[in-house]
Amino acid sequence: MKSYKVKGLIFYSNLTLNSRHILNDSQAEVQTKLDEYSQQGYWLMSTNTVSYGPAVYICLYSEKDLN
């Protein structure tokens, strides 16, 4: 049997000349969440990102075996 987790993260755009600022700013928070889930025995199955207006939504799909 498996257990699943879905985590949605939202990052908002800022006015800047750096076109990669969302990637740079979100990397630490995403890694922290992955480390947290890893300590609980989950592994990353899939990801999804959506850009809507001034925000980027990142979904992390994780699973672990309960056996």
Image (cartoon, rainbow, N blue to C red):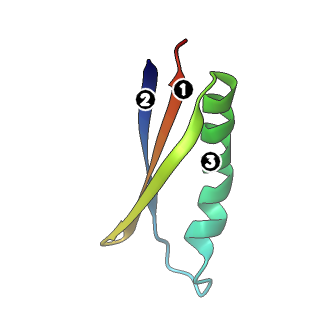
Amino acid under disc 3: Glu
Residue at the image point whose x is 69% and y is 25% from the top: 39
Asked whether 56 or 2 is in front, the reply is 2
Image coords of residue 33 (percent x, y)? 60, 39
Earlier residue among tags 2 and 3: 2
> Callout 3: helix, strand or loop?
helix
Whether tag 2 and tag 3 are in contact, CB under 8 A, the answer is no
Residue bearing the label numbered 2: 4
Relative to 36, 10 lies left or right: left
Earlier residue among tags 1 and 2: 2
Q: Quadrant of the N terminus?
A: top left
Residue bearing the label numbered 3: 29
Amino acid under disc 2: Tyr
Amino acid under disc 1: Lys
Q: Is residue 17 above or below residue 46?
A: below
> Callout 2: helix, strand or loop?
strand
Which of the 4 image quarters holds residue 54?
bottom left
Which of the 4 image quarters holds residue 19?
bottom right
Circle nearer the viewer, 1 or 3: 1
Circle nearer the viewer, 2 or 3: 2
Asked whether 37 or 63 is in front, the reply is 63
Q: Is residue 28 above or below residue 37?
A: below
Image coords of residue 53 (percent x, y)? 30, 72
Residue bearing the label numbered 1: 64
